[in-house]
Image (cartoon, coloured by chain):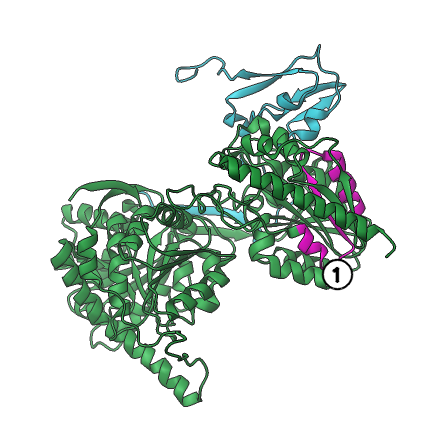
Amino acid sequence: MKEKEINMELVPGGWVSTPRPAQKTGTWRTLRPVVDVEKCIGCGICESFCPETTIKVVDGKAEVDYEYCKGCGVCANECTSQAIAMELEVEEESEGGGY
Amino acid sequence: MALKAMTGNKAFAHGVRLSRVQVIASYPITPQTTLVEYLADFVNDGDLDAEYIRSEGEHGMMAQAIGAAQTGARTFTSTCSAGFAYGFQGIVSVPGLRLGNLMLANINRPLGAPGGLQADHSDGLTARDWGWVYLYGEHHQEVLDTAIQAYRIGEDHRVLLPTMVGAEGYYISYTTDLVELPEQEQVDEFLPPFDPVGVIDADNPMSPTVFGTTEQMMGMKYAVHQASLRAKELIKEVNVEFGETFGRTYGNGLVEEYKVEGADIVLVTMGSFTGNARKAVDDLRKDGKRVGLVKIRSFRPFPTEDFQRIAEDTSAFVVVSRHDSAGGAGAPVGYDVKSALYNMDERPFIQDIVSGICGVEISSDDFAILAERGLKAVEHGGFKEDLVWYPNMRITERFDVPPMPEEVKKNFVYPGTGACQGCGMTLIWKTVMETAGRDSVYVSTSGCGGWSGAHTMCIGTGGSGGNLPGGAATAVGIKRGLVKLGKTSTNVVLGSGDGSFGDMGFMAASGAAERNEDILMFVYDNQAYMNTGMQRSGATPHLAWTTTTPVGKVVRGKQAPTKPLPLIMAAHGIPYVATASAAYIPDLKRKIKKALSIKGCKYVHIYSPCPTGHRYPPEKAIEVSRLAVQSGMWPLYEVENGAYRITVRPKEFKPVSEYLGAQGRFRHLTEDQLEKLQETTQEEYHHLELLEKITNEDL
């Protein structure tokens, strides 16, 4: 039986100066927003409504941060150019247990 | 009798139902909440004939419970952690009022900062000294059985003290176990109706004494002390009788001993981790090591005599406290064990262990390690240390906080929050804080906003977490501090949920408004206590389904209308009040900008879609929010120095059924109810137009 230990360095009160995301929320996703760059007009509606700041217009086209995008689908639903499709998330190079 | 699988909170709720409780005072707080949700189901389905009070906060909840108990009605309430602390003024009064017909379920969770949601005894143990009969349950069946026993003990005229039943969060509250549900007839026989000594009743006028002569008050305190000591016999007696009726007993009622006979060292535990300790005892006994266990079932009254008896035949106690007493001579449970034994001629060695704090797991291996240490101490003539923390703590503190990197400052809100998919709150955070700019600090309150990230995790402007009732007050304190330190330009922004701001925190909010404190308060209104799992708040719309306003066989949805928070805030006469919506971002931005250009107290009330709680797919979040405005159910307006102005006026109103029909929480509405809601919505909108007219005219 091994004795347990809690070993860490702390700041009193836990003050932090850099936000620490709770988790890589991209793993929550079952549907993935895919931007059709042909249709995207870079209007920024998706960016303004994204609850997670994970879709941004970069160089005139919407780009998704898949590491954190939760796949809610608000961007696709609100896009007036129908430039975003929600596609079933498929685990690449699945080692079993994927879709 | 059949065994049924259920969570600990459900087992507890059945205990309350079977006890034929007559008044329930409730308020959500994790991990207690599902207990009162199950009770709401029982009441709305007609399975429990009780008055159910959906309180505005634990302070009120305790007062409601006290008031109800003073009428002689059998009363139940339930809380934990911060809620326990908020209700503390009431909690400390109940024993002195001798309300034995009041039971409080304490679903144990850490209290204070740093906090947590998991099991910890710091909440209930703070109420050690007031005269509550405090019983801890180890598992689901014991919790159910103890709930029934509690009223028998407390209501007996030899005791007349309220009972608190402790059950640890998560380990008991949310796990599922097999439970035997007693028959109602048997419970009725076991637990007769309460025979009160005094009651509040206009036909028989009388009042309890709270203040009297000093001698009288000391006398009443002594009577509580004596009654608490007398409860020991009652607890034992009730344990035996319960066994005769239901076939189950728990030790002698006060303690449950396990393989104590012939033990060199005895572990002392309380609560659900006793199971792990029991396994450790079994494992060590197999190796021939003489280890036993005492589970404290009754923490108050404390089983002094039992410990003295057990101490006669053991060499050491290892007492595990799931709470600390910082700077003290021991740990909270050990204090009592040591006091009980000090005047004996020969005392065993005692070691206090502080463990399992803030939900840290204590496994059977851990208990075995602690027991082995005890065996060694016996060999070596005593413990080297009187008190130790376990796991072994290697904590160092450093005192520098590096400045926020410039790269990080580019964003105001970072992704990776714990908020649900399609949450309006995070969208509102982003919009408000980007508009407010870097010379701002953010104050969150508990709830979705506090727990799913806020300042330490995702909001890049720094700030503080206010408590649920004190969000506005925390913002005021920060503003005043900054002003005093010369940082007068900094925007102090409070982001609060509708429940924390409008129910429990309204006193602080109203105080800030009345003094015209120079802060911006915004509410992300998701129209219920969503973080704890969709319980109704004052802001919940009329007839909406929530987990505490379930659509039952008898009562369907929330019976009270919505509390009109923006109008109430405007009535304070503060310089700026506005409503806004997550679906109208430019309007929201403009209002935040305008608010922050004004000195004084500002309030912006923002519709926040909640797909999880409003029951629709997440991608519809903005679409549904837009419908709220287009149907007139969420009018967008501002009130500047008393003048109302509607800022977004739908050209053509959509029927409210289109907005309501898009959400599962209104699925049960009848045609008649929809028609009535359509009428009310039009009336209220018309009222707003009239306000707009008269406040802009020269009268």
Q: Is residue B581 left or right of residue B90?
A: right
Q: Note whether B329 is above or below B662 in the view shown.
A: below
Outermost residue on the top side: it is: A38
Note whether residue B111 is visible. Answer: no
Instruction: Provide the residue span drawn in magenta.
Output: B566-595
What residue did someone put label 1 on?
B516
x, y percent for residue B445: 59, 51
Question: Chain in cyan?
Answer: A
Q: Nearer the viewer, residue B403 or B226?
A: B226
Three-letter residue code for mark 1 = Asn
Q: Nearer the viewer, residue B9 or B203?
A: B203
Q: Quadrant of the C terminus of chain A?
A: top left
Note whether residue A63 is visible. Answer: yes
> Is the residue marked by circle 1 packed among few (<14), some (14-19), or many (20+) residues within 10 Å?
some
Q: Residue at x 70, y 16 (%)?
A: A81
Q: Is residue B465 left or right of residue B6?
A: right
- Shown colour of chain B: green
Specify the subunit that label 1 lies on.
B
Q: Is residue B463 left or right of residue B543?
A: right
Residue B573 in the magenta stretch? The answer is: yes
Q: Nearer the viewer, residue B132 or B465?
A: B132
Q: Residue at x 47, y 12 (%)?
A: A93
